[in-house]
C-alpha cells in the first residue's frame, strides 16, 4: 500500500530532500532529460538552507550530452561524453572539485539509476516490447523481485505484460504536514518519472534518530502519478553519527510480490559505519538478497554524517 503521510520536521532536526524528474527525449527508448533538485534545511531555521539544481541530457547511446546548473566548470566538462553506468560513481568520487556527500554529488550519484527507472515507464507505455513467450529477462537475478521463478520471471517466460498497473501516488504536498517541508519542483508532465527522497536526522540523547522516505513514481499519459517503488526507513545511529545501532525498513508500493523479501536483510547494516555504507550494501545485499531500489535507499544513509558535520 502507498504511504499516506510523512512526519513533520522534528525539533533540532536536519532534512535533506532530493528529486529527479525524468522525461523522455523524444521517447523512453531514446534520450532522457533529467531535472534534479536537492535541498538541505534545519528545523527552526537554525542554519541557512542550501539548494542545488542540475539538468542533464542523456542520449540514446547512454552518453551525457549536456550538463547545466551549479557545478564547478571542470566537473561539468569531465562529465560530458561519459556514460552514467558501470564505474560512473567511482569516477565521480575521483573528480576534483566535487565534494563527496554534497548536494551536487548526491544528485549526480543518482544518474546510473535513471535508465533503470525509465525502464519501468517503458514497460507501462510499450508493453508489447516486453512480451513474447519464453523470454528470459536480463534482469533475472538482479534483486529479490527478479529472482528465478518469482512473479516477474514467470510473467516474462509466459510472454504476458510484466506490469499492467500501479497504485495512485499521493501528492507529496498532501503527505507533509506543513508548507515548505519539501523543496519547490518543476511542473509535473504526462509520460514522466519522478524519484523523490527525504532524509531526516534528529538528535537524541546518545545519538540520532533517522527517518528516510523514497519513492519512484510514473506519471502516465493522462497525467496520473502512480507509485512504483516506495520505501520508508527508520534507523538509530550512535553519537559518532556513523555507527548503525538499528535499522528497520517498511516496504510500501512495489511492483512485484517478492520485492518486500529484501527488506529484513537491511539489518545486515547494524554495527557498520555509514561512511562505508555503499560498499557494505554492495557486499552484503547484492543479488536476490537485496532490491536495487532499496539498496539505493540504504546507500543514501551515507548523508547522515555529512548533515551532522555541517
Image (spheres, rainbow, N blue to C red):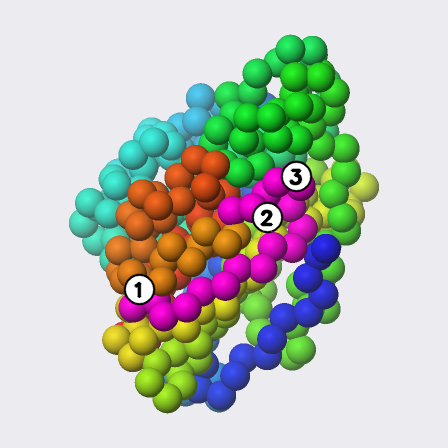
> In screen coordinates, is 110 left or right of 173?
left
Q: Is residue 232 above or below residue 85?
A: below
What residue do we see at 74% from left, 43% from top?
166
Q: Is residue 71 above or below residue 122?
A: below
Which of these two is toward me, 133 or 296? 133
Which of these two is toward me, 120 or 140? 140
What residue do we see at 60% from left, 26% from top?
149
What residue do we see at 70% from left, 38% from top?
191
Q: Which residues are drawn in magenta?
A: 243-262
Q: Residues within 10 Å of mark 3 (few under 14, many from 20)?
A: some
Give the percent coordinates (x, y) of residue 277.
Answer: 32, 55
Residue 281 is one of the magenta-drawn residues: no
**Element type where label 1 sits in the image:** loop
**First in residue order: circle 2 vs circle 1:** 2
In what quadrant of the picture does the N terminus appear? bottom right
Front: mark 1 or 3: 1
**Residue wearing tag 3:** 256
**Residue wearing tag 2:** 260
Quarter of image, res 169 = bottom right
Would residue 216 be seen by someone viewing this image from the given angle?
A: no
Amino acid at each position: 500500500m502507498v504511504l499516506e503521510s510523512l512526519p513533520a520536521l522534528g525539533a533540532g532536526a536536519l532534512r535533506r530532500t532530493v528529486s529527479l524528474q525524468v522525461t523522455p527525449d523524444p521517447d523512453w527508448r531514446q534520450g532522457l532529460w533529467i531535472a534534479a533538485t536537492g535541498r538541505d534545511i534545519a528545523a527552526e531555521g537554525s542554519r541557512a538552507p542550501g539548494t542545488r539544481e542540475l539538468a542533464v541530457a542523456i542520449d540514446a547511446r547512454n552518453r551525457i550530452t549536456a550538463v547545466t546548473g551549479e557545478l564547478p566548470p571542470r566537473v561539468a566538462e569531465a562529465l560530458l561524453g561519459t556514460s552514467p553506468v558501470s564505474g560512473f560513481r567511482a569516477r565521480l568520487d575521483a573528480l576534483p572539485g566535487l565534494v563527496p556527500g554534497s548536494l551536487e554529488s548526491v544528485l549526480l550519484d543518482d544518474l546510473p539509476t535513471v535508465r533503470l527507472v525509465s525502464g519501468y515507464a517503458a514497460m507501462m507505455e510499450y508493453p508489447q516490447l516486453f512480451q513474447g513467450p519464453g523470454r528470459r529477462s536480463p534482469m533475472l537475478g538482479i534483486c529479490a523481485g527478479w529472482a528465478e521463478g518469482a512473479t516477474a520471471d514467470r510473467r516474462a517466460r509466459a510472454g504476458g505484460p510484466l506490469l499492467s498497473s500501479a497504485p495512485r501516488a499521493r501528492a507529496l504536498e498532501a503527505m507533509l504536514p506543513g508548507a515548505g517541508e519539501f523543496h519547490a519542483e518543476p511542473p509535473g508532465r504526462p509520460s514522466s518519472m519522478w524519484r523523490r527522497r527525504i532524509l531526516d536526522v534528529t538528535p537524541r540523547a546518545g545519538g540520532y534518530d533517522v527517518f528516510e522516505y523514497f519513492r519512484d513514481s510514473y506519471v502516465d499519459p493522462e497525467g496520473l502519478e502512480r507509485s512504483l517503488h516506495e520505501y520508508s526507513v527508520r534507523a538509530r545511529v550512535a553519537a559518532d553519527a556513523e555507527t548503525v545501532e538499528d535499522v528497520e525498513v517498511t516496504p510500501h508500493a512495489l511492483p512485484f510480490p517478492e520485492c518486500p523479501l529484501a527488506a529484513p536483510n537491511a539489518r545486515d547494516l547494524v554495527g557498520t559505519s555509514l561512511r562505508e555504507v555503499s560498499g557494505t550494501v554492495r557486499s552484503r545485499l547484492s543479488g536476490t538478497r537485496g532490491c536495487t531500489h532499496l539498496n539505493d535507499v540504504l546507500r543514501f544513509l551515507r548523508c547522515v554524517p555529512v548533515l551532522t558535520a555541517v
